């Protein structure tokens, strides 16, 4: 079953959010408009709006408030992708040219900044100070996470704690904020807000670990970019950290990274093969599963509703996804 099937009954609300997204990024400047629209039309699962919608079901559901929060969070996510592609020098995203590839780094950075600004402007209509404070803190942590990732590129002296902190800032925080703000926007009970925040954090951690596994186990076509891209760009993910416990693997990777300016896709194939043939994928999956179990546990307090069942179904899908 595809992920979208688990929340297909939300289609009308998601369509409303999609229309609002298109309206919000409609810039007067033709280049900004075209670059922003290209990014929006590239698609994506719209997971953050889905989490906002589902979390809003545990309070006094108001589609106007939910729409405002969902649009702002998805715009922040989109803007971070544009900046990521510049940092990683990525030419493809979801199988299509990135904003950076189609124009240049400068246009991409201004496009990301514009989308960030539109996100904040959009949220201004929501008269809930707590929501603004949480979103601002989330954006600060996102930026810190990006800086930490840049600092740690091609650095083999990393550990599990470094990795977990990085993916928390890179992925889990925005998902947990989506869940939390959905609850806050609809005035859900504080215990539900806290439960949903924890659920979002654990789901986000699991989701990113699975992403990092798929970077080695999926095909180029499935990924929409070359397999092993993270390693090629010097980003050490969980499977690599586990593989580095093997001294021979560690020494070879350190030597390769010493030539970081000349590394090619061909150079990393032996490392990909080692990771796929060892037990590090299974170990990485086991850690992802532990986070999923915590996600299930965190929402036990929620009432038995269709929204809760959907949150559980999404967790199940994430644990089993292949692409």
Image (cartoon, rainbow, N blue to C red):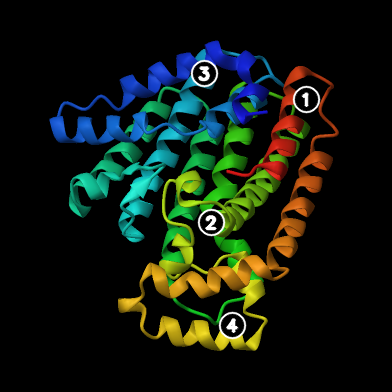
Tell whether 38 sits left or right of 226: left
Q: Which residue is mark 1?
A: 309
Residue that numbered label 3 is attached to: 14
Residue highlighted by disc 2:
215
Q: Secondary structure at mark 4?
A: helix
Q: Residue at x 84, y 41 (%)?
A: 297
Cα–Cα gap, marks 1 and 4? 43 Å
Q: Residue at x 38, y 27 (%)?
A: 122
C-alpha gap between disc 3 and disc 1: 18 Å
Q: Disc 2 versus disc 3: distance between alpha carbons?
A: 29 Å
Q: Earlier in the sequence, mark 3 or mark 1?
A: 3
- Which is more foreground, mark 1 or mark 2? 2
For the residues carrying marks 1 and 4, which lies nearer the camera in this image? 4
Q: Are marks 2 and 3 in contact (CB under 8 Å)?
A: no
The disc, 4 or 3, on the residue closer to the chain's N-terminal end is 3
Q: CA distance from mark 1 to mark 2?
A: 29 Å
Q: Residues within 10 Å of mark 1 (few under 14, many from 20)?
A: some
* Circle nearer the N terminus (1, 2): 2
Q: Quadrant of the C terminus?
A: top right
């Amino acid at each position: 079953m595809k992920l979208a099937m688990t929340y297909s009954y939300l289609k009308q609300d998601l369509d409303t959010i999609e229309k609002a997204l298109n309206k919000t990024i409609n810039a007067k400047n033709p280049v900004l408009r075209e670059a922003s629209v290209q990014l929006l039309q590239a698609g994506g699962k719209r997971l953050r709006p889905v989490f906002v919608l589902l979390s809003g079901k545990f309070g006094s559901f108001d589609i106007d408030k939910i729409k405002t929060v969902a649009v702002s969070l998805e715009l922040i996510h989109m803007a971070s992708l544009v900046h990521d592609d510049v940092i990683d020098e990525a030419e493809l995203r979801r199988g299509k040219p990135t904003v950076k590839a189609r124009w240049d780094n400068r246009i991409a950075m201004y496009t990301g900044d514009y989308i960030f600004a539109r996100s904040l402007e959009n949220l201004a209509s929501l008269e809930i100070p707590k929501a603004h404070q949480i979103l601002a803190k989330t954006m600060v942590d996102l930026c810190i996470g990006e800086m930490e990732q840049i600092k740690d590129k091609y650095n083999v002296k990393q550990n599990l704690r470094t990795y977990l902190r990085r993916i928390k800032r890179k992925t889990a925080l925005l998902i947990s904020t989506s869940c939390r703000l959905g609850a806050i926007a609809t005035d859900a009970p504080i215990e539900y807000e806290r439960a949903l925040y924890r659920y979002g954090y654990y789901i986000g951690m699991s989701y990113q670990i699975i992403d990092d596994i798929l970077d080695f186990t999926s095909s180029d076509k499935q990924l929409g970019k070359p397999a092993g891209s993270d390693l090629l760009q010097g980003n050490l993910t969980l499977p690599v950290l586990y593989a580095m416990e093997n001294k021979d693997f560690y020494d070879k990777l350190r030597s390769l990274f010493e030539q970081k300016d000349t590394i090619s896709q061909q150079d990393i194939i032996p490392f990909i093969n080692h990771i796929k043939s060892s037990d590090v994928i299974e170990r990485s999956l086991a850690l992802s599963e532990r986070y999923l179990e915590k996600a299930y546990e965190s929402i036990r307090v929620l009432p038995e509703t269709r929204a809760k069942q959907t949150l559980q179904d999404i967790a199940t899908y994430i644990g089993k996804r292949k692409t």
